[in-house]
Image (cartoon, helix red, strand yellow):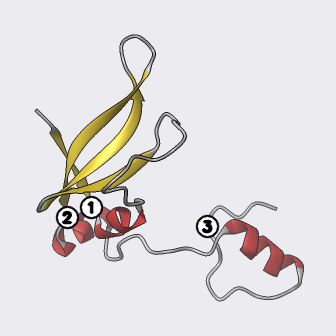
Amino acid sequence: MKHTVMLTNYEFRRLPEYSLTVPTGVTIGRRWRRCDGDRWLLGEYVLDANDRAAIRWRWIELMDPAEERRAYGPIAPTRRRPARIAKRLASRGNRLRFPARGLRS
C-alpha cells in the first residue's frame, strides 16, 4: 500500500519529472515525481533496513488554494531572490525592493 503526501502546487512544480526513468546518482533524500496513468507519484531515495538505498513511492495529492492559504497564511510560498544574488546587489550598493530572507552579512 502506498501512502499519500499532500503538496502545494508550488512544491509539485518544483519537483523534477522522471516519468520514464529514475534519476541518476543515488542520493538519499532526493525526490522526484512520476506520472502513473492519471495520478502522480512521489519517488524518494531512502535507506532500507539493511542500510541500502531503496525507492519509496507515495501518491501525490495537491492542496486546493483555500487549503494552501490556511496552511501558509494569505500568501502561498513564492519564488524568492536567491541569497547570493541579493548579497551581490547589496555589495554594489543597489537597494533591494524586497529584501531577501536569510541574507547574512
> How far apart in space, not on screen, are marks 3 and 2 (Cα)?
25 Å
Residue 73's x, y, as percent?
32, 69
Alpha carbon separation for disc pair 3 and 1: 20 Å
Residue at the limit of the structure toward the top, as seen here: 50
Three-letter code, disc 3: Arg
Q: Is residue 38 left or right of residue 44?
A: left
Give the side of residue 20 with respect to residue 92, left or right: left
Mark 1 — residue?
71
> What whole-number distance in Å separates the C-alpha atoms at marks 2 and 1?
10 Å
Q: Is residue 5 left or right of residue 30?
A: left
Image marks 2 and 1: residues in contact by CB distance under 8 Å: yes
In the current view of this chain or complex, which residue is farthest to the right? 92
Label 2: state its secondary structure: loop
Mark 2 vs mark 1: which is more N-terminal? Answer: 2
Quadrant into which the C terminus falls: bottom right
Please give left or right for residue 96 compared with residue 37 in the image.
right
Q: Which residue is mark 2?
A: 63
- Viewer-nearest of discs 2 and 1: 2
- According to the picture, the residue beneath numbered tag 3 turns out to be 101
Amino acid type, mark 1: Ala
Tag 3 near tag 1, CB within 8 Å: no
**Mark 1 Cα within 10 Å, few/some/many (few <14, many 20+)?**
few
Dot label at residue 94: none
Q: Residue at x 34, y 33 (%)?
A: 55
Please state which of the two labelled residues, at mark 3 or mark 2, is closer to the viewer: 2
Give the mark nearer the N terminus: 3 vs 1.
1
Dot 3: element: loop
